[in-house]
Image (tube, grey):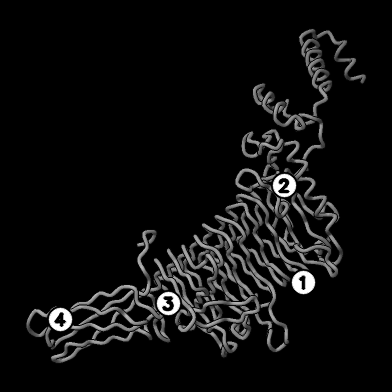
Amino acid sequence: SKATVSVLNCDHQPHRTMLVTALAALTAAVSVQHPAHHPAHKAPRDLLRRISHHNPAALAAVPPPPSRGLRVSPVDHGADPTGRKDSWAAFNASLQVCLDQAVRSPNGHFPGDSSFGNGKAILDMGGCDIDLAGGEYLISRPIVLPEYVGNMQFGRGSLIAAPGFAGDFLFVIGIAGSCRYNQNSCNVDINFPELFLDGAHVASGMQINNVMGVTIGPGGYFLNFTSYGLQINRGHEVMMDRAWMGETNFDFDHEGRHAAPNATAIQINGNDHYILNSIVFSSRIGVEVNGAADYIKGVHVWFPLNHATGYANTMAFHVASGGNRFDGCYIDGGRAVFTGTGLSRNLWTNGFECCQIGTEVAGTPHSGIVLVGKTFGPGLEVVHNEFKKPVQVYTAMSPDGKYEAFDPEKDTLTVTGTRVSANSMTEGVVGTRATLKLAQTAATQWDFDFCSKLLFPQIASVEVSVVAASGVPKAVARPPVGCKVSVVTDAPVTGTITVKVDSSDASDKYE
C-alpha cells in the first residue's frame, strides 16, 4: 500500500529495519502449513516420537475439533430436540465427531500404550461430550458405540424409540460375546449423566458389553422398555447410581388392563458391577444377578399397586449366582428369589420387606426372601434385616413360576454353612437358629419342638444349658428327629432348661 511504501522509503533507518524484520517473521510463520491443532505447535520431541510410533494418524492433517472444544450438540448435526422427527442420523454424526477425536488425540491409547495382543488398543476420545441439552429426540434404530474407544460422555436429555424401531436397544456399547481379551473390557470410561430413555414399548433401554468404568446416572430414568431396561454383559465395574427404572409407568394397573409384566429392569451377566441407590417401580424382574462379586446397595423394588405376587413369575430380585452382596435393599410387596449357585456365598443384610397388597397366586410364595433348591450353602447369609413376612423354602421352580414345596417323604435337604438369623419378622420369625426354654418341676424328660421356628425342618447341632433349683444334675440331648429334640436328666430337676439349635451343618469355609 502507499502507506507501507512511504514508511519503507522514509529516512528513519531504525524504523525501517524493525518493520522489515517483522514482515520477514510474518512471512515465515505463514509459510508453515500445520493446522492450528497440530501437535507440532505444542508437543516436545519425545512426545512426538511416542505419537509417531503408537498413533501416527494423530499427526496427519485432520479436520480441527469443533469451536466449542469437545462438547458436541446433536442439533448442530440436524437432530430435532422437539422429538417430532427421526434424529438417529444426527446422533450417528455426533458420535463420529467423538470417534474422530480418538484419531486426532495426541494422547494415543487409553490408558497409556497397552495393547490387547491382537493389534488393537483403546483409543482416547478425550472426554468428548455429546450434550443433549435438555432436548427430547426420536430415534429409529440403536445408537451403537463401537469397541476399542473410551473417555466420553452422553447425556442431559431424552431418547425415545420411534414407532417401528429397528433393533433391540436404544443404546448399545460394544458387541455381545466379543472382546475375549484383557479382563473382557474393550471400552472404558463411558458416562451417561442425567439420561432419560423411553423404549415406547417397542425397544429395550441400554445394553453394555465388555466394558470397564462405565457409569449411569445420577439422574437416569429408563421407562417403557420391552425386554430389558439395562443389560450388562461381562466386563467389570459398571456403576449405576440414582436411577429409576420401569417397564411401565408406576401407576400402570397390569391386572386391570390384563397386561402381564414381561421385562427385566436390570440384568447383570458379569462380575464386579455396582447398582446403587436406585428404584425399580415396574417390571416382571427387578434386578437379576447372574455374576459374582456384584454389589447391590440401597435398591428399592416395587410394583404398581404393590401386587407383584398376583403373578406367579414375578421377582423383585433374582439371585442366580454366588459371591455377591446385597446391602440395604427394599423388597416392596414382591419376592427376592435365590436359585442355583445363588444359594451359596451370598450376603443379604440391612434389608427391608413389607407391604404386599392382596393374596399371592395359589401355590406360590408370598412377598419376601425365597430360597429355591435342595442344597444350601456354604456361605449363604441372610442377617440383620427387618421383614414383615418370614423367609420361605421351596425345592424347585419352573420358568413360568410354578413352585414345588418341600416334601419330607421324598426330599432330602443339604444345609451347610448357612445362616438365616438375627432378623425381625413381624408375622413369625424363622431361621436356621432357634432357642426354646422349658420350665418343669421334678422332671427328667424335656421335649422341645422347633418346627415353627426353623426354616429347614432339621436339626444339625444342639446346645443345652440347665438352671436347677437344687443339686448338680447332668443333662444330655438325644439325637434330633426332624425339627424336634429331647433332653434327659440323670435325676429329677426342678428348674429351666434352655436349648439352642442350628439346622445348618458346620463348614470349614464358613464360620
The reply to whether residue 480 is in sight is yes
Find the distance from the CA under tag 4 to the CA under tag 3: 32 Å
Where is mark 4, residue-wise? 467
The residue that label 3 is drawn on is: 386
The numbered mark, 1 or 2, whose residue comes first in the sequence reads 2
Q: Nearer the viewer, mark 4 or mark 2?
A: 4
Which of the marked residues, 4 or 2, is nearer the chain's N terminus?
2
Q: Nearer the viewer, mark 3 or mark 1?
A: 3
Q: CB atoms at circles 1 and 2 under 8 Å apart?
A: no
The residue at the point 24 percent across, 78 percent down is: 477
Kind of residue at disc 4: Val
In the rendered image, residue 445, in percent from the top left (x then y), is placed at: 20, 88
Q: Earlier in the sequence, mark 4 or mark 3?
A: 3
Indicate which disc, 3 or 2, sits on the residue closer to the N terminus.
2
**Relative side of 191 to 158, left or right:** left
Q: Quadrant of residue 334?
A: bottom right
Residue topped by disc 2: 147
Residue in the picture at 68% in, 23% down: 49
Q: Which residue is mark 1?
A: 200
Q: Residue furthest bottom?
A: 441
Q: Quadrant of the C terminus?
A: bottom left
Q: Between tags 4 and 3, which lies in front? A: 4
Residue 262: percent from left, percent from top: 70, 75
Disc 2 element:
loop
The crowding category of the residue bearing disc 1, from other C-alpha atoms within 10 Å (few below 14, some 14 to 19, many at least 20), is: some
